[in-house]
C-alpha cells in the first residue's frame, strides 16, 4: 500500500514561504492528516551541525505521540561540487554527513536516506563525472549500510536524470541497499512515457516525491527588431492536478509495477497563491486528497 507523506521542506521557509520549526512541521503534518513525514536533513530542520542525539530522540518521542512514521531523511548532496578545489575532501565531507544522518535515522525509526547524484560541470568530461557519482553513491551506500539504512537515489540532478541513464546508473552502483526514489516531474519535462517508466522502476523503488507544475512562456524584447525572442519556459509550482504532469498515468504504472512505498508531497519552490501559512496549508491539505485518489486509481 502506498503511504502519503509530507516533506517538511514544504514548511522550511525557503523561497519566501512561511517557516515552521521541525517540531511544528511534524505537528502540521498530523493536523493536515498525513500519516508519514520525510524530514529535510539540513537547517532549519534536521541539521547534523545543530542537532545532537538527545534532540533527535525528542523528535522521535514527538512522532510517536503524533502517530507519525518517519519515512525518510532527505540528504542534500552534489557529488560533482567543488571541482575547482579538488584539495578539499568534499566527498568525505558528504559521506560523513550521510553517516550522521544514518545515525539520526536509526533514532527516528527510519531506514531510508534520500540523496542526489551531481550537476554537470565543465571541469570534467561527462564520463568522468558519471564515474565520480557512481563511486560516491557506492560510498554512501556503504556508509549507510553500517547502520542498516538504505540509500534512495532521486532522479533530480543532471547525472542519471533520464530514465535509461537512471536505470543504468543504479545498475552500476550495484549495492543491495541502493533503491530508486523515482519522480515524475523531471522526466515529464523530457517527454517520457510516464506509465511505462513508472511500471519499469516500481519494483526498485522505495519512495517517490510529488509536485505539479505549469510552463509559462518567456520572451525577451529586441528593440532593434521591435519584436521578441522566445526564451526557455519558466516552470512554476501549482496545486496537484493543475499542472502538465500526467500523474494518473504515473500512478497507474506504479500500481501495475507493484510499488507500495512512500509518496512524498513537497512544496519545494514558490507556490501558486503565495507563501503564507494559510496557503501552504490549503495546498498541502488538497494534495493529500488528490494523492489518495491517484493512489487508489
Image (spheres, rainbow, N blue to C red):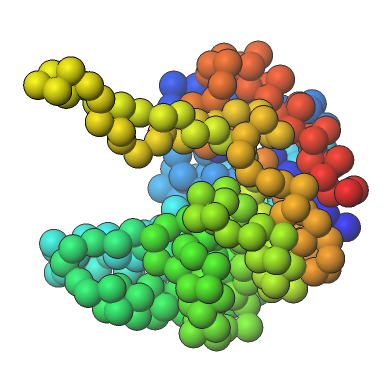
Whether residue 21 is visible, yes or no, is: no
* Relative depth, front residue between 102 and 288: 288
Question: Where's the N terminus, which quadrant?
Answer: bottom right
Q: Residue at x 54, y 45 (%)?
A: 40
Q: Position of residue 211 (x, y in %)?
A: 62, 40
Q: Is residue 64 left or right of residue 114?
A: right
- For residue 252, which quarter of the picture? bottom right
Q: Position of residue 164 (x, y in %)?
A: 53, 73
Q: Is residue 15 left or right of residue 22?
A: left
Q: Position of residue 173 (x, y in %)?
A: 50, 82
* Relative depth, front residue between 203 and 91: 203
Q: Residue at x 18, y 18 (%)?
A: 226
* Relative depth, front residue between 35 and 248: 248
Q: Position of residue 219 (x, y in %)?
A: 30, 27
Q: Considering only vertical position in the picture, is 243 above or below 294? A: above
Q: Considering only vertical position in the picture, is 113 above or below 18? A: below
Residue furthest to the left: 224
Q: Residue at x 35, y 75 (%)?
A: 130
* Relative depth, front residue between 151 and 158: 158
Number of numbered labels in the structure image: 0
Whether residue 245 is visible, yes or no, is: yes
Q: Residue at x 40, y 66 (%)?
A: 159
Amino acid at each position: 500500500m502506498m503511504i502519503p507523506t509530507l516533506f517538511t521542506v514544504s514548511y522550511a521557509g525557503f523561497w519566501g514561504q512561511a517557516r515552521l520549526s521541525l517540531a511544528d512541521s511534524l505537528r502540521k503534518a498530523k493536523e493536515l492528516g498525513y500519516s508519514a513525514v520525510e524530514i529535510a536533513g539540513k537547517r532549519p530542520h534536521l541539521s547534523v551541525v545543530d542537532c545532537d542525539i538527545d534532540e533527535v530522540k525528542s523528535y522521535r518521542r514527538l512522532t510517536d505521540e503524533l502517530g507519525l512514521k518517519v519515512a525518510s531523511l532527505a540528504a542534500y548532496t552534489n557529488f560533482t561540487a567543488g571541482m575547482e578545489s579538488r584539495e578539499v575532501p568534499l566527498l568525505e565531507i558528504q559521506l560523513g554527513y550521510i553517516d550522521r544522518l544514518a545515525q539520526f535515522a536509526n533514532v527516528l525509526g527510519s531506514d531510508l536516506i534520500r540523496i542526489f547524484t551531481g550537476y554537470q560541470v565543465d571541469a570534467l568530461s561527462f564520463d568522468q563525472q558519471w564515474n565520480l557519482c557512481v563511486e560516491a553513491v557506492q560510498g554512501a551506500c556503504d556508509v549507510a549500510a553500517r547502520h542498516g539504512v538504505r540509500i534512495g537515489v532521486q532522479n533530480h540532478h543532471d547525472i542519471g536524470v533520464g530514465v535509461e541513464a537512471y536505470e543504468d546508473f543504479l545498475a552500476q552502483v550495484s549495492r543491495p541497499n541502493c533503491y530508486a526514489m523515482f519522480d515524475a516531474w523531471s522526466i515529464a519535462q523530457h517527454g517520457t512515457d510516464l506509465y511505462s517508466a513508472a511500471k519499469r522502476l516500481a519494483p526498485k523503488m522505495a519512495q517517490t516525491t510529488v509536485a505539479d507544475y505549469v510552463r509559462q512562456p518567456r520572451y525577451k524584447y529586441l528593440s532593434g527588431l521591435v519584436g521578441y525572442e522566445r526564451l526557455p519556459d519558466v516552470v512554476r509550482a501549482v496545486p496537484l492536478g493543475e499542472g502538465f504532469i500526467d500523474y494518473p498515468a504515473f500512478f497507474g504504472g506504479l500500481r501495475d509495477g507493484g510499488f507500495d512505498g512512500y509518496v512524498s508531497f513537497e512544496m519545494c519552490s514558490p507556490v501558486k497563491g503565495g507563501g503564507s501559512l494559510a496557503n501552504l496549508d490549503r495546498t498541502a491539505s488538497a494534495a493529500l486528497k488528490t494523492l489518495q485518489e491517484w493512489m487508489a486509481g
